Image: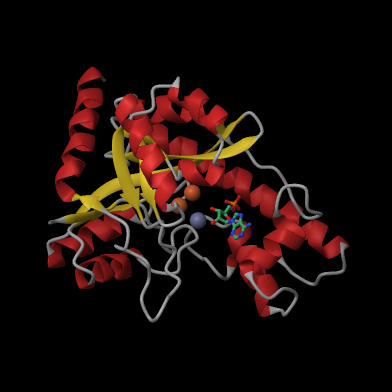
Amino acid sequence: MKKADLHMHTTLSDGLLTPEEVVRWAYKKNIDTISITDHDSIDGISRAILESKKYDINVVPGIELSCFFQDHEIHILGYFIDYKSEKLNKFIKKLKESRKERNYKIIEKLNKMDIDISVKEVEMLSSEGVIGRPHIARVLIDKGIVDTVKGAFDIYLSKGKPAYVERYKVSVKDAIDLIHSIGGVAVFAHPGLINNSMILNNILQFKIDGLEVIHSKHNKDQVEELTNIAKHNNLIVTAGSDCHGYLDDGEPSLGNFFISAKDVELLKEKADFYKKML
Ligand code: AMP
Ligand code: ZN
Ligand code: FE
Ligand code: FE
């Protein structure tokens, strides 16, 4: 079976692997189709596509948008998007500016707690990409202030913690509409992490096209339940490792969670439908 892993991050957001390294890992792990789904960024896509030609790997242009629904942060994946569209690029620029302002505010809050950390130190970790709390967490680890990324979130960076700062996000509905307007399909990322059927039911009322049923953090019961929900609601099932490049026994999780590459055709057909409507 040809395999497709449709969810991973690169150094252009908070991943540790470059787009080129991601493609080479896909090749090593026998994955035929990947999608680069960086947080609020499309900068890794063309680099991955260029590298993929050497290895005969298919790269689906993707993105993972951080959205809000009520009080919750929801991630929506867009696939087969026109990633060069002016509309998308304007939107991403706005998000980047908002992140930059927010990073300054987070650092300021940490400084007020007598933690010696600067924006420059954080930006040095990712000269090219989308900078956010995971990068701040890594600096805090390097300085011995916390032991793990999770620790940094639990003590300082999560909502409700002392260095938390809100940032600009779109609503789930607007994110889905944006993705359709640039010829892409919209998939609800890792619904099992939200694990809230009320929210899931609400999101199903929007024009979502698919559910990320198979995900590195979903257990067997969740996969089964989400498979049934997808079937009942006529949604496309997708799969993703959500690989951030951390090594486990020397290998990243890339390719450990997958669907058949044939199923990617369903996403493509639906995207073609939206493209025709433009
Ligand atoms: P940001 O984009 O700056 O809001 O940071 C969000 C990212 O931080 C998520 O995509 C996760 O990769 C990571 N993250 C969020 N919460 C946690 C947590 N509790 N532990 C570890 N990583 C987290
Ligand atoms: Zn991430
Ligand atoms: Fe996510
Ligand atoms: Fe992700």
Residue 135 position by quadrant? bottom right
Residue 82 seen in the figure: no
Q: Is residue 136 above or below residue 220?
A: below
Quarter occupied by the C terminus: top left
> What residue sits 65% from the left and 72% below the top?
139
Position in image of residue 109 (x %, y %): 81, 57
Q: Between residues 102 and 253, which one lies in front from this camera angle? A: 253
Left/right of residue 239 with respect to residue 178 in the rendered view = left
Q: Position of residue 249 (x, y in %)?
A: 40, 80
The quadrant the N terminus occupies is bottom left
What residue is shown at x 34% (from left), y 34% (from top)?
A: 228
In the displayed structure, would residue 151 be above or below residue 13?
below
Count of number-bearing discs: 0
Chosen colour scheme = secondary structure
272 vs 44: above or below: above
Measuring 81% from the left and 54% from the top, which residue is drawn there? 162
Q: Above or below — where is 219 with respect to 92?
A: below
Residue 72 at x, y = what percent?
Answer: 62, 36
